[in-house]
Image (cartoon, grey):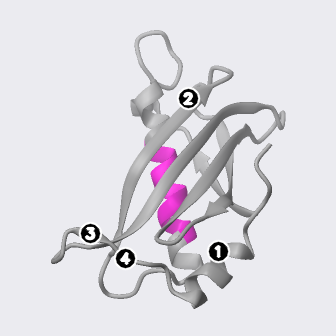
Amino acid sequence: MHEIEVNVRFCETDLLGHVNNNNFFVYMEDARIQFFNDLALVGNDWNFILASTKCDFIKQVYFNQTLIIRSHVVKIGRSSFHLEQDMFEKESGELVAKGLSVIVQFDFEQQQSVALTSEMKESLSSYQMVAK
């Protein structure tokens, strides 16, 4: 399980005082990028695209709360993998949101997907969990 912390900034809240739903996708992106870096999936060239993403909002989050984002792989395909990201409020440990992204290795010159290398698959499998 890969884990990062995110501190909610005031600018990420809306008129109702809670985190605007768009910001959860930013938190997920921050966690994905750190996940890619920690697994050394990207070198000098960024060769991944986001094919699909969704987020289920479970509980409201407010300014100055700290979130823990735990990411794990639920499926590894030929050229893609599915990354589940659970977001918890740090102090209470309560689940506040649940995201899922499909990430594809992509050749931008050829405009098509590219198979993941065996090294990438091995690295990803170390963070793989069975979908719930």
Q: Amino acid at mark 2?
A: Phe
Q: Residues within 10 Å of mark 3 (few under 14, many from 20)?
A: few
- Answer with left or right where residue 46 lies relative to residue 30: left
Does label 1 or label 3 sit earlier along the sequence? 3
Secondary element at image label 3: strand
Q: Which residue is mark 2?
A: 63
On whether residue 88 falls in the magenta region, the answer is no
> Split into 4 quadrants, where in the image is the C terminus?
top right
Q: Position of residue 120 (x, y in %)?
A: 56, 83
Q: Amino acid at mark 1?
A: Leu
Q: Depth-wise, is mark 2 or mark 3 nearer the camera?
A: 3
Give how far apart the Cα atoms at labels 1 and 2 are.
Answer: 33 Å
On whether residue 32 falls in the magenta region, the answer is yes
Q: Which residue is mark 1?
A: 124
Does label 1 or label 2 sit earlier along the sequence? 2
Q: Which residue is mark 3?
A: 112
Task: Please say if the residues under marks 3 and 4 sit with CB atoms less than 8 Å apart.
Answer: yes
| Total numbered badges shown on the rendered structure | 4
Magenta range: 26-35
Does label 2 or label 3 sit earlier along the sequence? 2
Q: Amino acid at mark 4?
A: Val
In this view, the residue in front, 37 or 109, is 109
Q: Residues within 10 Å of mark 2 (few under 14, many from 20)?
A: some
Give how far apart the Cα atoms at labels 2 and 3 are.
Answer: 41 Å
